[in-house]
Amino acid sequence: MVEGRLISTVTDLAQQNPLPLEHIVRITRIAVALYPTDYNLLLQRQWILSLVCSLETIYRPDRVSEGDQNKVTALRDSYLDICGRVLAIDDCNAESWYHQSCALDHLERYEEAIKSARKAHSIEPTPDTTCQIAHILQSLERDQEAVRFIDTSGYTHHPDVQEARRIIVSLME
């Protein structure tokens, strides 16, 4: 099974930390090359790219050389494409909505990001989706709405949610 070997290779590459950008690009190419219509493979591709996209290099453009910016942009576009494909098959996949929200947030496409985050939260509310929505609201300069959302989320005792609230409140002062 070729797909299984590719996924093992990608997983092995992704275990390296810190991961050089050329490996990130290789992982992306392998993930995108997987058969594009099988739902389970799409989920695996999404997992692979979410792992890759969570690396600091991707979310910290100031740490990427100017020449590598196109590679990073292409990686983010691939990630969004795969999230979109998964959601086209199963629009009740909360994890895909959440990942799409994170990618859009990092691209500063906040209006789209908040819609995806709210969709994820409506399907499966978690501390992560709560923090994500609050963060995007704060990015949209809607700090009071972010604090109200946290306070009514049901996760006010979760440490990550408490920290998100603390940060937003401190920025309001």
Image: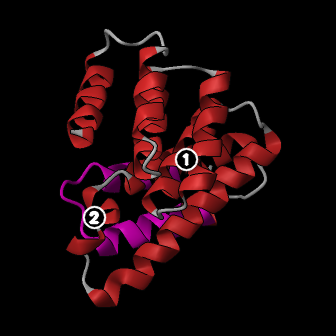
Q: Amino acid at mark 1?
A: Ser
Q: Is the magenta region chiefly helix, strand or loop?
A: helix
Q: Which residue does the image show at 53% across and 44% down from the upper left?
A: 99
Please provide percent x and percent y for residue 103: 50, 55
Residue 8 visible: no
Q: Quadrant of the C terminus?
A: top left
Label 2 sits on residue: 60
Check disc 2 and report its element: helix, strand or loop: loop
Label 1 sits on residue: 101
- Which comes before the other along the chain, label 1 or label 2? 2
Please provide percent x and percent y for residue 124: 61, 20
Relative depth, front residue between 106 and 148: 148
Above or below residue 125? Residue 52 is below
Q: Quadrant of residue 119?
A: top right
Relative depth, front residue between 99 and 165: 165
Q: Which residue does the image show at 32% across and 75% down from the upper left?
A: 22
Q: Which residue does the image show at 49% across and 14% down from the upper left?
A: 152
Please provide percent x and percent y for residue 39: 74, 42
Residue 159 located left or right of residue 125? left
Q: Amino acid at mark 2?
A: Arg
Is residue 173 rendered magenta in the image?
A: no
Q: Alpha carbon of mark 1 to alpha carbon of mark 2: how far?
A: 17 Å
Q: Which residue does the image show at 56% across and 19% down from the upper left?
A: 125
Classify 10 Å Cα crowding around label 1: few (below 14), some (14-19), many (20 and above). many
Residue 32 visible: yes
Above or below residue 27? Residue 49 is above
Above or below residue 124? Residue 117 is below
| Magenta stretch bounds | 6-32
